[in-house]
Image (spheres, rainbow, N blue to C red):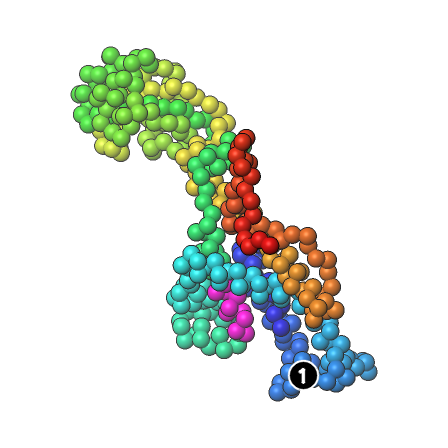
């Protein structure tokens, strides 16, 4: 009996390990009721006793009916879902290697009391694990690969999430800086008297010796903590008058001297975009994967319900037939045919006539 539904981390609920634990417990309880070596449950006479509790007898037929009514549709959904995973993985050329799943199995099933650190220890543990638990782990890893290959986060989506204010943590004062970098202190001091806010960007393009030269020395927004660990540089960024270039300051990376210009200053500013972009991209991907996975689950449930309405299955799992199968969330919708232009003949159906 399959008792778990495949999950993927936070996207769909508990990790497969927790679901397996519950199902494994259920299987153990059934093993107590049905002695080892007994005939398979489906071939046991319906009136045969499965268990006796407080002088009450539970019949094998009642047990089988309860299992069918409680778990048949969920198990059917799971089997359809696994078939979908296999098909998609084949189309994308994705596989889970022996090394990949064994590494995950060691990490997933190792505990402080019973650690797994070698292949031999894992093989010993696998002797006591149902085959479907191993299959679920492989499918979970394969599903993660399918989602990673099928879902991307665009720059526009990441920027939109940043602008929405989802990153609320602040780091105090933030400043927008321009800089001109010199390798020699003498060059920096010789240039300083000529610099103004109005010509700073142009001089940066001409003489700066760093990667921000082509952007007119635009160094972007920085919090004080994100600036190089130099007291003089941070003090200038925090206290300088906007639009007044600094005196030459020593710079550790790249080695040399720098003249800074504070173009703007904000207090209680959000974390700079470049500093949190990686977190935002991960959040966008998680949301999109969750949306795809929920749509996929809905489609699988609808398909399972249609199959379950087959005549041989109707009495076990009754249910309404959906009017239409939901669209595959990973397959783009086919474009609609353009309407005929004025004067164009209406297309006629092809095929044999009478």
Quadrant into which the N terminus falls: bottom right
Q: Nearer the viewer, residue 6 or 295?
A: 295
Q: Residue at x 57, y 63 (%)?
A: 80
Residue picked out by circle 1: 43
Where in the figure is residue 130, as x and y percent of width and height?
Answer: 54, 74
Rendering quarter of residue 184: top left
Magenta-tinted stretch: 130-141
Where in the figure is residue 181, as x and y percent of width and height?
Answer: 25, 25
Image position of 346 (left or right of 237): right
Image position of 268 (left or right of 181): right
Looking at the image, residue 201 lies above or below residue 154: above
Residue 239 covered by magenta stretch: no
Residue 140 covered by magenta stretch: yes
Is residue 167 visible in the rendered structure shown here? no
Is residue 134 visible in the rendered structure shown here? yes
Q: Main secondary structure of the magenta part?
A: helix
Callout 1: 10 Å neighbours few (<14), some, many (20+)? Answer: few
Quadrant into which the C terminus falls: bottom right
Looking at the image, residue 200 lies above or below residue 57: above
Q: Residue at x 51, y 68 (%)?
A: 135
Q: Residue at x 43, y 26 (%)?
A: 174
Q: Nearer the viewer, residue 99 or 65?
A: 65
Rendering quarter of residue 64: bottom right
């Amino acid at each position: 009996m399959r008792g778990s539904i495949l999950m993927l981390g936070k996207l769909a609920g508990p990790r497969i390990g927790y679901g397996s634990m519950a199902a494994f417990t259920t299987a153990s309880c059934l093993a107590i009721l049905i002695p080892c070596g007994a005939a398979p449950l489906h071939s046991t006479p319906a009136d045969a006793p499965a268990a006796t509790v407080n002088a009450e007898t539970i019949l094998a037929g009642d047990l089988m009916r309860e299992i069918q009514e409680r778990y048949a549709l969920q198990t059917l959904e799971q089997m359809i879902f696994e078939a979908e995973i296999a098909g998609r993985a084949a189309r994308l050329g994705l596989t889970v290697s022996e090394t990949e799943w064994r590494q995950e199995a060691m990490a997933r099933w190792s505990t402080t009391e019973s650690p797994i650190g070698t292949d031999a220890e894992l093989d010993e543990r696998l002797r006591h694990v149902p085959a479907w638990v191993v299959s679920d782990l492989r499918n979970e890893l394969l599903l993660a690969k399918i989602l990673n290959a099928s879902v991307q986060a665009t720059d526009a989506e990441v920027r939109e999430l940043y602008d929405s204010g989802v990153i609320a943590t602040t780091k105090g004062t933030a400043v927008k800086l321009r800089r001109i970098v010199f390798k020699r202190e003498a060059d920096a001091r010789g240039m300083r008297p000529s610099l103004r806010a109005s010509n700073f960007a142009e001089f940066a393009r001409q003489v700066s010796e760093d990667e921000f030269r082509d952007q007119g020395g635009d160094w972007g927004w920085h919090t004080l903590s994100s600036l190089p660990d130099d007291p003089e540089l941070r003090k200038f960024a925090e206290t300088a008058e906007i639009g007044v270039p600094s005196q030459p300051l020593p710079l550790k990376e790249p080695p040399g001297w720098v003249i800074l210009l504070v173009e703007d200053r904000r207090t209680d500013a959000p974390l700079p975009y470049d500093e949190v972009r990686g977190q935002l991209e991960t959040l966008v991907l998680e949301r999109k994967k969750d949306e795809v996975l929920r749509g996929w689950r809905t489609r699988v449930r609808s398909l399972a319900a249609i199959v379950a309405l087959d005549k041989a299955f109707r009495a076990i799992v009754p249910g309404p037939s959906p009017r239409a199968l939901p669209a595959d969330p990973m397959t783009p919708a086919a474009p609609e045919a353009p309407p005929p232009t004025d004067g164009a003949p209406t297309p006629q159906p092809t095929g044999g006539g009478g």
